[in-house]
């Protein structure tokens, strides 16, 4: 199991980790330094929690797409693209703005007794921790992430992940989550999913 060390805000750099298990994936990690925007996003989540939708989050959650048109989210995405355009091919500066990306972004609120069921996403997936987060478990790659405020993680499609039930008494935890949907990549993602499913059945 791998536990990633904290990147401090003043260090202001990013990591990329390549894991093979047996497919090869790239997980990117950095720290967002816009503290004011993160505080504002925490407030927006806490004031817009809904319980009406079926979801893998057994806790608080905003509506799907809640952050899509928020300037705080746009600034964060611009930051991520700038930071990772030379290290993660998905954000390559030569074709990022030609990918026709659609965002589906929302906020989660996690308290004691809450959890997130193990699940995957068919698209690239981005998590920004607006506060210290509960351990994020990625069983396929034998990794547990201990998130700190401002840490963000970028996962490729079909990475299994979840959060065990929070048992300790703690402050409320908030994170922003977004799927980065490349409109023209559905055939590629369908092939990846079929390959992963076939390997899991063996």
Image (cartoon, rainbow, N blue to C red):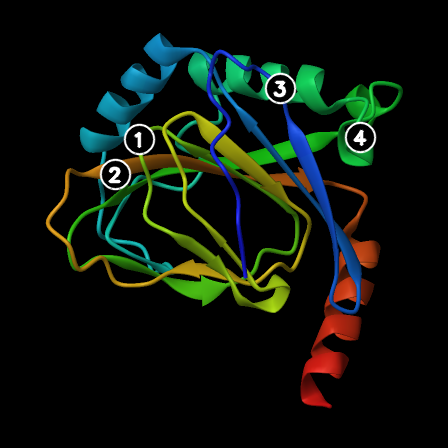
> What label does residue 173 carry, if any?
2
Alpha carbon of mark 3 to alpha carbon of mark 1: how far?
Answer: 19 Å
Q: Residues within 10 Å of mark 2 (few under 14, many from 20)?
A: some
Q: Residue 46 appears at what percent x and percent y?
A: 20, 31
Mark 3 packing: few (<14 Cα in 10 Å), some, or many (20+)?
some
Q: Is residue 147 left or right of residue 48?
A: right
Q: Secondary structure at mark 1?
A: loop
Residue at image position (45%, 66%) is: 118
Residue 56: x and y, percent?
Answer: 38, 60
Marker disc for residue 43: none
**Residue occupying the point 80% across, 30% down:** 99
Marks 2 and 1, how far apart at CA: 6 Å
29 up-or-down from 141: above or below: above
Residue linked to disc 1: 131
* Pointer 4 local density, CA inside 10 Å: few below 14, some 14–19, many at least 20: some
Give the distance between the C-alpha atoms of the residues marked 2 and 4, in whole angstroms: 33 Å
Tag of residue 13: 3
């Amino acid at each position: 199991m791998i536990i990633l060390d904290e990147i401090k805000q003043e260090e202001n750099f990013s990591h990329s980790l390549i894991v093979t298990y047996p497919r090869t994936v790239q997980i990117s990690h950095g720290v967002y330094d816009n503290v004011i925007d993160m505080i504002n996003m925490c407030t927006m989540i806490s004031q817009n929690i809904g319980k009406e939708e079926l979801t893998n989050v057994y806790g608080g959650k905003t509506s799907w797409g809640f952050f899509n048109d928020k300037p705080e989210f746009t600034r964060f995405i611009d930051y991520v693209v700038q930071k990772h355009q030379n290290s993660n091919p998905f954000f390559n500066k030569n074709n990022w703005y030609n990918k026709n990306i659609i965002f589906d972004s929302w906020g989660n609120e996690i308290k004691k007794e809450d959890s997130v069921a193990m699940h995957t996403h068919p698209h690239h997936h981005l998590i920004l921790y607006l506060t210290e987060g509960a351990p994020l478990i990625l069983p396929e790659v034998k990794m547990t992430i201990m998130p700190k405020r401002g840490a963000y993680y970028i996962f490729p499609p079909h990475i299994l992940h979840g959060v065990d039930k929070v048992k300790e008494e703690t402050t409320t935890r908030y994170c922003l989550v977004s799927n980065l949907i490349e409109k023209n990549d559905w055939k590629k993602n369908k092939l990846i999913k079929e390959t992963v499913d076939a390997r899991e059945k063996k």
